[in-house]
Image (tube, rainbow, N blue to C red):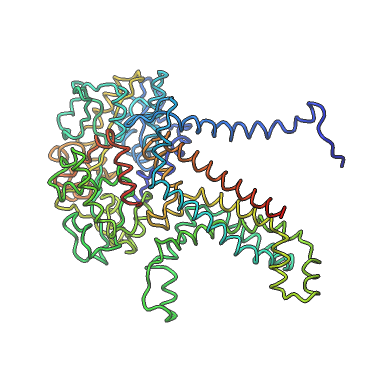
Amino acid sequence: MITTPIKRRTLLGAGFAGASMLAMPSILRAQDKSLKVGVYGGYFKDSFDKNIFPEFTKATGIAVESIAEPTGEAWLVQLEQAARAGQAPADVSMMSQVAMLKGQSTDLWTPIDTAKIKNASDLLDRFVNKYPDGRIAGIGAVSWYITLVTNTDVYKEAPTSWSAFWDPANADKLGLLALVSNSFLLEVTAKTFMGGTNALDTEEGLLKAFEKLAEVKPNVRLWYRDEAQFEQSLKSGEIPMGQYYHDVTGLAAADGHPVRSTFPKEGGIQDSGCWALSRASQKSEEAHIFIDYMCQPSIQATLSRKVGTSPTVKREVTDLTDKEFAAVSSDIEPIVPRYDLYQTKSDWLNQKWTELIVG
Amino acid sequence: MRREPPQTLGDYLPLLFPAAMLTIFFVVPFGTMIAVSFFQRQQGGFYTPAFVFDNYARFLSVFFGGVLGFSLMLAIIVAICCVVLALPFTYMLTRMARKVQVVWLVALLSILSLSEVIIGFAWSTLFSRTAGITNILVALGIMAEAKALTPSFGAVLTGMVYQAFPYTVLVLFPALVRLDPTLTEAARTLGASPLKAFFTVVVPALRNTITATLIMVFIFALGSYLLPQLLGRPQHWTLSVLITDQAIYQSNMPFAAAMAVFLVLVTLGLVALTVIAGRKGEAA
């Protein structure tokens, strides 16, 4: 049972927290074989330390030293600089998709041999991160959904489409994420009005999406960076609609708050993190065993139940009940963010986005 | 105690420690920042050492000019509000009994212990529609229905003035305590009203202190980046918010550094102007 309010994706200050926690890694058991695993600090690390790593050590005899890593890109920078010096602060790390792409550009990730990962066949395709030449850079670790959330006191009927954001009736009622690279609203716009995220391939397409998105601005009361700020306002009905994390909203609803999370017909936004192996690591063998272990349907199901993440493997192979599955995911085809854009066009997108919401 | 200039190397020793601290914790980081601001940004990667002006060039646009202008204006308004409120307050405080003064000062100091986050969340609750102060006004029959006062410019300003007010009082307090009470007494004997005595005697006598306080609050307010996010709309975000975005979320250190250097330069320029204007005023 998860009772703590979830701050795992909070970026603000995570860098400092991460850096200070690096000094005290928790060593589970001193054994011959060991592996240093970087996990997002805070909620994720606590959950993994409690629910996953001890079982892994029991099953494989490999001791895990878990390391709290800051989300965002600070950890990528540290891994990269350490790898240049031949050091690996962690062997395997949980990395965001954009960080995966950035690491690919410097060959930071040791290619993963799927022959050694017998559970790889159950993975959904989108959770296998590949180099442009086809080598495998990372394997899906966890994924989660950002969905359309509403306050049930204010909205008796659940909205069915992301287009609710554009409805003039919702003027000054929305809370949306403040950054182009974490709100994924361009993808939402493209999927809802432009036939799919492929419409963002060209600059014209992107500009059209920006133009359409500009119509949402009068409806937005809060552009949030801090999750707690929006969650509080959503619960109280101060800001009755917006985008938020599906699992956290579900937990709030279970606690009796008047909130609901809806998968719009265009799909929820599915963001995810990968396991990736630093090229400076000497523990390739153990790392493959670890990644294989994490890809097991039973472990993915455990993660869904205990951590609230959505499975990276096909639904059929897990033993999740309908209710358990619905708590973390949906059968509606998700909107998968165009991570490539945040690598190749990040400055341009950021500039346009900032001008859009600040201007 | 004798005061004479230090003569031997040993006399300078006590200075070494603060000098070293200043070098390690200010000069070196600031120098690094200036260096990074000329580095080449690598989109989708990190940055490479270089000497390019791209980062500054990107900043020189109408958009960033507007944000910079807003940040400076906000900081100036906060400084003026704080001094206008704190000067009469502190003046009256210094005229009170010692015990009352201690209570007030402790209360003000306790505000300093609150983090910006707590101040921001507290004000956003006070200004909210569902739990805010407008509900009291409705209960009193002054307002027809509760409404949200945040996000707005007024909310940002209130939060920032609240945060800077204790500093302002603490800076003004020593000067006002030391102010010779016979000055106002003389003015009063000559027939000035208390209000007139305050404005014609107290305020001019404290001109340098007031200028220094304005500059201090201005610089303090310029660095604020959390309150504008918590209490304002995006158009109320300061340059510090955008610097944070670039540094933390876009990992564009060179551009963030360039913006920060620019902000420091503009700030120093404004402070220099104020000091020069103050000197001219004294000479006249």
Front one among B125 and B276? B276
Front one among A179 and A78? A179
Count numbered badges in the picture.
Answer: 0
**Residue A220, image x and y in percent?**
30, 58
Front one among B135 and A339? A339
Above or below — where is A238 with respect to A125? Answer: below
**Residue B156, image x and y in percent?**
46, 59
Identify the image quadrant of residue B249: top left
Identify the image quadrant of residue A296: top left
**Residue A176, image x and y in percent?**
30, 53
Q: Is residue A3 left or right of residue A264?
A: right
Q: Residue furthest bottom?
A: B141
Above or below — where is B9 with respect to B233? Answer: above
Q: Residue furthest front?
A: B284
Identify the image quadrant of residue B26: top right
Which residue lies at the image location 43% right of the left edge and 61% below the top edge?
B153
**Residue A187, image x and y in percent?**
21, 45
Front one among A108 and A61? A108
